[in-house]
Image (spheres, rainbow, N blue to C red):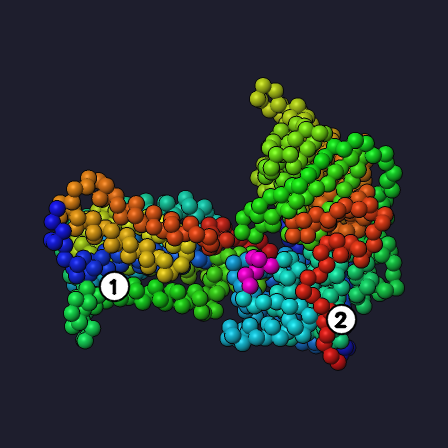
Amino acid sequence: MSDTLLSIRGLTKAYPGVVANDDVSFDIQKGEIHALLGENGAGKSTLVKMIYGLVAPDKGDMSFDGAGHAPSKPSEARQAGVAMVFQHFSLFDALNVAENVALGMENPPAPRDLAKRIREVSELYGLPLDPARMVGTLSAGERQRVEIIRCLLQDPRLLIMDEPTSVLTPQEVEILFETLRKLKAEGTSILYISHKLEEIRALCDHATILRHGKNVGTCIPAESTAREMAEMMVGSSFATPAAHDRELGDVLLDVTGLSLPQQGDFGTPLRDISFQLRAGEVLGLGGVAGNGQDELLMALSGEYLTEAGSVALKGADVSRHGPSARRNAGLLSAPEERLGHAAAPDMSLTENGVLTAAERQNLTSNGLINWGKAQGFAETVIKTFDVRTPGPHVAARALSGGNLQKYVVGREILQDPEVLVINQPTWGVDAAAAASIRQALLDLAAKGAAIVVISQDLDELMEISDRFGALNEGRLSAPRPVAELDMEQIGLMMGGAHGMEVAHVEH
Amino acid sequence: MDLSSINPVLLVASIMVSATPILLAAMGEMVVEKSGVLNLGVEGMMITGAVVGFAVAVNTTSPMLGFVAAAIAGAALSLAFGFLTQFLLSNQVATGLGLTLAGLGLSALIGKPYEGMKSPTLPKLDIPVLGDLPVLGKMVFSHDIMVYFSLALVVAVWAFLKHTRAGLILRAVGESHDSAHALGYKVVRVRLIAILFGGACSGLGGAYLSLVRVPQWTEGMTAGAGWIALAIVVFASWRAGRVLIGAYLFGGVTVLQLNLQAAGANVPVALLSASPYLITILVLVVISARGNHGAPAALGRPFHASH
């Protein structure tokens, strides 16, 4: 077994009320890219945290290159040769690149040498980075490079990557894959966590699939279809949203020359955005995170007011109206950040329902809340969108990310909006629930609503949109019918891959 | 008004003495806040340091032992704050305010038998050559050791935060405790050490008040110095150099307005008395109004390693 780098035997980890990992076993060979597949909540993150020493297993053991591997803290795992690129970057905005890299290393060299090594490694792998830049000013793709370079500087033998591509453009993904293949050719093993099946088919040698914390099978991705792997992940087959064929009606939302100055230190200004949206139409807006998505949603929802005449709803100017006025006029929105923006974490689902639906669902009379009716509305959302929760009295914070997402999306859809602006509608929900949310959006459009969907998931946008536009540094490309587009053009619309080149390690 | 009664040499010398307690407390609090913890108990720790330092110095007749005891007392009080906020996850604002109230009460109790006594005070250093310089020697180079200690502390804290790995880790913890935890750093331990350091510095600042500046004990003698130290940290944008400016500015205006009052300036006394607060805040607001404020992003947020 000298070819095995990491061997996992019977790993079990239980949290109160949920078994995150149940008797999981598999091996990672030297110099292979091994995929770990599973839906949100399948136990992938817990598993890699055990390998990286952040969580101690309840049962089971691991061996790394023949020796026992039971790291009690990440520094021990790093010394053994395990490095990890986190899904939510473990970076510090107010520190510069070199300082961020130094924090992730056991014995960082002196600052000047470190800056030099960062430049060397970043050029070797085609990931240019300036060591003196503040991390808060970097794009998501650049932040990921910081994490990757931090790992590479330690010459890891096993590199763990947790959902690395969720924030990248197609071109950036290609460059990342090229870097990973070079690493593999150098003999580094990679544990690649994702739920994007096409990526795994393109990149990985083996795949281990987790469902509800159990290892439900392995496969060779290149020899399996995406559908087969998806069904192993979900454990059943699910319906893909029905194709759309709709009559378009009048223009409901007319955005002309919408601009917004930069908000806060790390915000993105909006620059001269124009588009029209007709009844029954779904406009998909893609783009790498941080290119103005949040700002656009808030400018449309009324959280940021813009110059008079820039946003018109059904022909009436609403640019200077706040969110409540726009809601009453039929323009609803669902922001990306669930806790704190879309929902108040410590308030119950019923209360959270009242917060946005009070007017349109007549949940108040004479300034008093009709709690019976409010609870009824919350229960309808829970039932219609299959929100798994003990009931509407539960605090929003207590729901898992995917379930809360279903609730906040459902809450807006059930208010019969005429225009709905929604950011990341299926972020963090499992494949079956994502399909039902998309279907609900399509049904809403079929009833004559106009919908703006902002998303990082291009497959999702291609599936449900009539037209597609991309945000890049606060500018919107002219929306084009989805039928005319291929991936290459979409990548170019998203602004391409600035300053990136394919790795050129010689062997 | 007779301005000639103000001696510039004595004025500068007393400015340095007057600024030292606030400088000590503010440096400690800056380190605490850099680690992401907001301890509003500075006033309480200062006055506890003042009374404990005074009591120990009177009983042992050694002012140095008084300072050591004051640092320990301040740290002990901050440990209570650290335990409540870091392990029991209590609200930092409420706990800090409670610490101030507890410190004020505790000090009044301890200090009762010492009222009206006079403490042994620190000797002025006799620095060769520098101390003999004309004007400058008397102005800057003939103070007690704590004045120079406080200035050295500013340099040390600046260098620690900017150039050492431990300082980088401390800033990282204050910037994002979740990221720091994910990288395997001990967030709670780092914060506790910072809290203890802040408590010790506050204690020293308090003892400087009761042992050097006004060498006697009066109930409530800190008179808001701890709150000024807190404000200086914020308006100084969490930078050691600016904290120094803020503390000396406050000390300077305090001494100057006393001199002006003595010289019979034609300005209402109430306005003169308020002027140190007004001018310090005004100047620091102007400094910090320009761009980057640099508040540690995790300041005041509780941390719990949930997985």
Mark 2 vs mark 1: same chain? Answer: no
Q: Which residues are magenta?
A: A133-138
Residue drawn at (70%, 49%), measured in percent from left and top?
Answer: A471
The residue where tag 2 is placed is A181
Chain holding disc 1: B
Instruction: Quadrant for the C terminus of chain A, please.
Output: bottom right
Kindly identify which numbered label has been placed on residue A217.
Answer: none
Q: Is residue A268 visible in this depiction of the protein? A: yes
Amino acid type of the residue tagged 1 in the rendering = Val
Residue drawn at (86%, 64%), measured in percent from left and top?
Answer: A222
Tell me if A436 is positioned left or right of B296 in this view.
right
Amino acid type of the residue tagged 2 in the rendering = Arg
Tell me if B282 is positioned left or right of A337 in this view.
left
Q: Residues within 10 Å of mark 1 (few under 14, many from 20)?
A: many
Query: Residue A19's spot in the image, x, y percent?
Result: 69, 53
The residue where tag 1 is placed is B147
The residues tagged by marks 2 and 1 sit, at their Cα atoms, a distance apart of 61 Å
Query: Are dots 2 and 1 in contact, CB under 8 Å?
Result: no
